[in-house]
């Protein structure tokens, strides 16, 4: 397998993009693909005005520079597409509260956004709205705000929400959409990443359930590379065996943001 690593020279190219003109985007309307099991709605907010700088594009890149996708969990429940408007990602997948999912398109793939640390330059960022355990069902791996620090076991799990089956299906549809769109414009997505691989502070991002159902699916169905077993950048953490199902000798870090000790 091949992999790419963030280079210092990318910083110079990022600065140059602030003055560059956006590439021509072949922007089809939001699709309505068939999903036999779930109702999946598409909401296109790419032309909506951002009210905060956080949600605005930081520059532009060419289609050939779009090389990967980074998966995130929001760590907070979001039910309305309007609440996604200022999120610095290209797309989001919400639970519609009725057994289905909502896919929200926020930026074109050529937009440069600060979503994934060292993956910003080349990756599309996708948020899946949930507060998920790093390892599904294990309360020790659930990140929670400080006010819930004293909670343990089932009380901790009660504050979490895993991605629904419909959201996972929606995320797979969104990855297929981006794969097709980038190819139609002369580029090629090659990699699938977890945010934890690019930061020491997001060990549960996006979590085992999302990675197994979406990240591993992309590697198999779309032939995107996950890189070598120990792949990480910018002081991030490699994919643990508990996520990949492979015996690479990579344990999950039980300490989440310094707030929870191993049990």
Image (cartoon, rainbow, N blue to C red):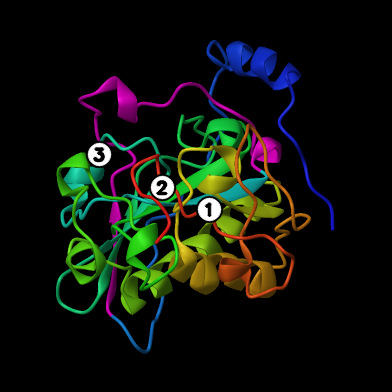
Image height check: is 114 above or below 200? above
Q: Quadrant of residue 10?
A: top right
Q: Quadrant of residue 229?
A: bottom right
Q: Is residue 50 magenta?
A: yes
The residue most toward the bottom is: 36
Tell me the distance, in whole angstroms, between the alpha carbons under discs 3 and 1. 32 Å
Estimate the x, y position of residue 2 in percent, counting from the top left: 84, 52
Q: Look at the image and tell me in which quarter the C terminus lies.
A: bottom left
Relative to 238, does residue 212 appear above or below in the rendering? below
- C-alpha span from label 1 to label 2: 7 Å
Foreground of the two, 26 or 189: 189
Mark positioned earlier in the residue sequence (3 or 1): 3
Mark 2 Cα within 10 Å, few/some/many (few <14, many 20+)? many
Magenta stretch bounds: 39-66
Residue 256's disc number: 2
* Residue annotated with mark 1: 253
Callouts 1 and 2 close, C-beta under 8 Å? yes
Report the mark closest to the observer, 3 or 1: 1
When the figure is inspected, residue 112 is found, relative to residue 250, above or below; the finding is above
Residue lying at 25% horizontally and 28% vertically, measured from the top left: 50
Say left or right for 87 vs 149. right
Instruction: Name the N-terminal-most of marks 3 and 2.
Output: 3
Residue 201 drawn above or below residue 221? above
Q: Tell me the residue at 33%/43% (across/down).
A: 259
Image coords of residue 9 (percent x, y): 75, 17
Main secondary structure of the magenta stretch: loop
Indicate whether residue 47 is drawn in magenta: yes
Residue at left offset 60%, top offset 40%? 236
Which residue is disc 3 drawn over?
85
């Amino acid at each position: 397998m091949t992999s790419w690593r963030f280079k210092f020279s990318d910083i110079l190219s990022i600065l140059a993009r602030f003055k560059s003109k956006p590439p021509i985007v072949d922007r089809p309307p939001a699709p309505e693909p068939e999903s036999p099991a779930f109702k999946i709605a598409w909401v296109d907010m790419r032309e909506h005005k951002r009210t905060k700088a956080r949600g605005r594009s930081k520059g532009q890149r060419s289609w050939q520079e779009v090389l990967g996708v980074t998966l995130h969990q929001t760590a907070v429940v979001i039910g309305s597409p309007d609440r996604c408007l200022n999120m610095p990602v290209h797309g989001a997948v919400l639970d519609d509260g009725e057994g289905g999912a909502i896919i929200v398109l926020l930026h074109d793939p050529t937009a440069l956004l600060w979503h994934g640390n060292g993956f910003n330059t080349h990756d599309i960022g996708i948020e899946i709205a949930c507060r998920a355990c790093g390892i599904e069902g294990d309360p020790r791996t659930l990140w929670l705000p400080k006010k819930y620090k004293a909670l343990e076991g089932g009380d901790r799990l009660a504050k979490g929400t895993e991605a629904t089956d419909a959201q996972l299906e929606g995320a797979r549809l969104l990855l297929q959409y981006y794969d097709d769109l980038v190819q139609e414009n002369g580029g090629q997505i090659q990699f699938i990443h977890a945010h934890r691989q690019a930061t020491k502070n997001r060990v549960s991002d996006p979590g085992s359930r999302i990675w197994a159902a979406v990240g591993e699916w992309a590697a198999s169905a779309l032939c995107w590379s996950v890189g070598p077993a120990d792949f990480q950048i910018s002081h991030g953490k490699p994919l643990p065996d508990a996520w990949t199902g492979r015996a690479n000798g990579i344990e999950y870090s039980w300490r989440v943001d310094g707030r929870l000790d191993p049990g």
